[in-house]
């Protein structure tokens, strides 16, 4: 569990942390010299009941609010510190706003430097502080009067912290590991060490992690929490992670250490933002602001459909970032802008990995994993949604996502095909389209056996594994059947009108009469006056015609006869030249070469450098 300090510069935060823990968290020489905190400090606090809490001490100076943000992110509890002699000051208000935007909902308020004021003054300051937090999550926080100098109230403060800690919900250890990095340094003999608060999941020694956004892989060589070696670190713990094979320059504050493939950095986020009411003017899409999420701090533009965002407004937006950031659905962030920089608002991430640069903000706020999944499936349409990143894009633990997608009874009606998820309604619609397509085809081409599966795939405009899934469902549902590369309505057989029946017989007679040198398809068409290919295909399916060339069908009897001639005339193993075979078959060259190629194709003969030989088992091709 993490407690973060908050409050105006010089109000006594670091002194109180020291009074509580005995640790001086101002460790930099410059901090000592200037007497202020510049960067984050860390100290363990043993509570009365034995539990260990980590304190993150933040700077109060307005120049270091970005450091405060890197510390305040990921805390469970806040300790707002207000000096009794000065009362509520600008960073008191800004820090409270930031805690509120980050969704920190519990904590304690310490009115400190009690030794510097009298009772009357103290009473006024208490009232001011109550008013300052009245509209925030800290309005119910216990207020304790302290002095780091005399020690007054420090034990009461410790008890109040313990009570607040007792109200904090435990974080889920059975989730994806994520640690936003707040410090990176080198330890002699150990190498590069990164530190941070474990936001979710657990990490064990020797695990392999990635450092995002760079993507560098590394082995966890060692783990510590507050200086003690650990075998594993859990959510809500401070962790120092020693990484093998990583240069200190390959990680920095703002990076994120993850273990799972579901995490992906993105320069585009879909989110809901809320701007503070006190903002002087609306925020347009061209204004660059600072975006703070986790320990990351990057430039961002906020694009809302339909123009600028007004002070006090809440809106669904696209966040276009200067640099990629690792985020998860449900993550809170803070926005700062203007000059000098001040906190201007914040928000919640809806989709941390939009599929497309032009992805639109979600229409309705979705705060549950199933609502988010429905929204993702809707907007993905025929493209489907990749399964692997869902725990990140839905902001839910992998087992929660698995239960949403339980096979047979998915909470969100959907099917996974080839690593992607598709809305069930969409697949049903594709099924209807396919049935219509096949039915229409049968009406249009009653003589044809069915529709080429390939043309169904391209008509549906989906990945071929999705088309195959749809066809499979239709076959199992007894709507369709597949024969080779063709799909047809179940029980369908090609039909002929009386006139076409007559044309079919005429064609068959023509081919039979033409024998070894039949006319090509276009010649037959010229003679018939209409398309003959469907009829020829019917003859082919009936075994009465053979497409020896692409545009020339032979009567099956003629083919059988010629193959018989070859089988009789060719001796096993001997190679025959085309000239010899022409003499045997009595064909002109125009017909000879295509026919010999047909013989090779159908496995009747084999072509060798010295000529053709009879294939070992010529009877196997089904014609001879
Ligand atoms: N008299 C008195 N002085 C205090 C008390 N607590 C802190 N101080 C003094 O106030 C000054 C600032 O205290 P810090 O603890 O450094 O204040 P801080 O809030 O950590 O300041 P930043 O981190 O820079 O924002 C120091 O000189 C402290 O000695 C107190 O309870 N009584
Ligand atoms: Mg300090």
Image (spheres, rainbow, N blue to C red):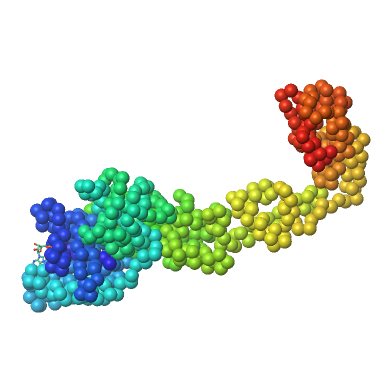
In this picture, is 149 found above or below 242?
A: below
Position of residue 357 measured from the top left corner of the image (x, y, whole percent): 45, 49
Of 10 and 51, which appears nearest the observer? 51
355 left or right of 496? left
Position of residue 23 measured from the top left corner of the image (x, y, whole percent): 14, 63
Residue 238 visible within the image? yes
Of 398 and 290, which appears nearest the observer? 398
Position of residue 266 measured from the top left corner of the image (x, y, whole percent): 40, 51
313 left or right of 519? left
Of 49 and 102, which appears nearest the observer? 49
Residue occupying image coordinates x 10% and y 72%: 151
Residue 129 visible within the image? no
Total numbered circles = 0
Residue occupying image coordinates x 33% and y 58%: 204
In this picture, is 548 found above or below 280?
A: above
| Residue 269 lies in quadrant | bottom left
In this picture, is 521 found above or below 54?
A: above
Of 619 and 415, which appears nearest the observer? 619
| Residue 517 lies in quadrant | top right
125 left or right of 618? left
Residue occupying image coordinates x 16% and y 60%: 25
Position of residue 316 measured from the top left corner of the image (x, y, whole percent): 42, 60
Residue occupying image coordinates x 91% and y 44%: 505
| Residue 124 lies in quadrant | bottom left
Instruction: Give the quarter of the figure containing the C terminus.
Output: top right
Instruction: Give the quarter of the figure containing the N terminus.
Output: bottom left
């Amino acid at each position: 569990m993490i407690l973060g300090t908050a409050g105006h510069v010089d109000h006594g935060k670091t002194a109180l942390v020291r009074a509580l823990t005995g640790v001086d968290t101002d460790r930099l020489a410059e901090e000592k010299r200037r007497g202020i905190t510049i960067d984050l400090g860390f100290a363990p606090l043993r509570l009365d009941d034995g539990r260990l809490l980590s304190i993150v001490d933040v700077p109060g100076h307005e120049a270091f609010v970005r450091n405060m943000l890197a510390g305040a992110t990921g805390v469970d509890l806040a300790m707002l510190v207000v000096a009794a002699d000065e009362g509520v000051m600008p960073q008191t208000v800004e820090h409270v706003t930031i805690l509120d935007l980050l969704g920190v909902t519990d904590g304690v308020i310490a009115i400190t430097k009690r030794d510097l004021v009298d009772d009357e003054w103290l009473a006024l300051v208490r009232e001011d502080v109550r008013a300052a937090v009245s509209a925030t999550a800290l309005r119910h926080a216990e207020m304790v009067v302290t002095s780091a100098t005399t020690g007054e109230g420090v034990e009461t403060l410790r008890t109040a912290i313990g009570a607040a800690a007792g109200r904090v919900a435990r974080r889920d250890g059975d989730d994806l590991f994520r640690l936003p990095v707040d410090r990176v340094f080198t330890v002699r003999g150990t190498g590069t060490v990164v530190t941070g608060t474990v936001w979710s999941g657990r990490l064990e020694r020797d695990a392999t992690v990635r450092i995002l956004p760079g993507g560098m892989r590394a082995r966890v060589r060692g783990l510590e929490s507050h200086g003690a070696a650990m075998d594993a670190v859990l959510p809500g713990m401070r962790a120092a992670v020693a990484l093998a094979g990583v240069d200190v320059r390959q990680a920095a504050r703002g990076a994120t250490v993850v273990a799972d493939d579901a995490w992906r950095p993105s320069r585009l986020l879909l989110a809901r933002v809320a701007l503070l009411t006190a903002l002087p003017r609306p925020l347009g899409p061209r204004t660059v602001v600072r975006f703070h999420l986790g320990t990351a701090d990057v430039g961002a533009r906020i694009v809302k459909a339909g123009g600028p965002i007004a002070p006090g407004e809440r809106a669904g937006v696209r966040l276009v970032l200067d640099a990629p950031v690792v985020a998860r659905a449900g993550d809170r962030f803070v926005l700062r802008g203007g000059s000098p920089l001040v906190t201007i608002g914040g928000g919640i991430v809806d989709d941390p990995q939009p599929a497309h640069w032009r992805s639109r903000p979600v229409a309705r706020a979705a705060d549950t994993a199933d609502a988010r999944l429905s929204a993702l499936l809707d907007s993905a349409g025929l493209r489907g949604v990749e399964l692997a990143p869902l725990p990140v894009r839905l902001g839910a633990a992998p087992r929660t996502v698995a239960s949403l997608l339980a096979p047979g009874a998915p909470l969100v009606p959907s099917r996974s095909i080839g690593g992607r998820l598709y809305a069930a309604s969409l697949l049903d619609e594709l099924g209807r389209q396919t049935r219509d397509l096949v039915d229409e085809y049968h009406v249009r081409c009653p003589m044809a056996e069915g529709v080429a599966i390939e043309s169904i795939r391209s008509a549906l405009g989906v990945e071929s594994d999705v088309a195959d899934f749809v066809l499979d469902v239709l076959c199992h549902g007894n709507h369709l059947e597949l024969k080779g590369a063709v799909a047809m309505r179940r029980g369908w057989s090609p039909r002929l009108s009386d006139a076409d029946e007559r044309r079919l017989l005429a064609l068959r007679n023509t081919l039979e009469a033409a024998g070894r040198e039949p006319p090509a398809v276009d010649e037959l068409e010229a003679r018939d006056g209409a398309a003959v290919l469907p009829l020829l295909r019917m003859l082919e399916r009936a075994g009465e015609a053979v497409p020896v060339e692409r545009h020339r069908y032979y009567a099956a009897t003629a083919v059988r006869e010629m193959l018989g001639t070859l089988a009789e005339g060719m001796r096993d193993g001997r190679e025959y030249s085309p000239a010899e075979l022409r003499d045997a078959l009595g064909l002109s060259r125009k017909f000879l070469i295509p026919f010999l190629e047909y013989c090779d194709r159908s496995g009747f003969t084999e072509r060798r450098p010295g000529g053709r030989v009879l294939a070992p088992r010529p009877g196997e091709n089904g014609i001879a």
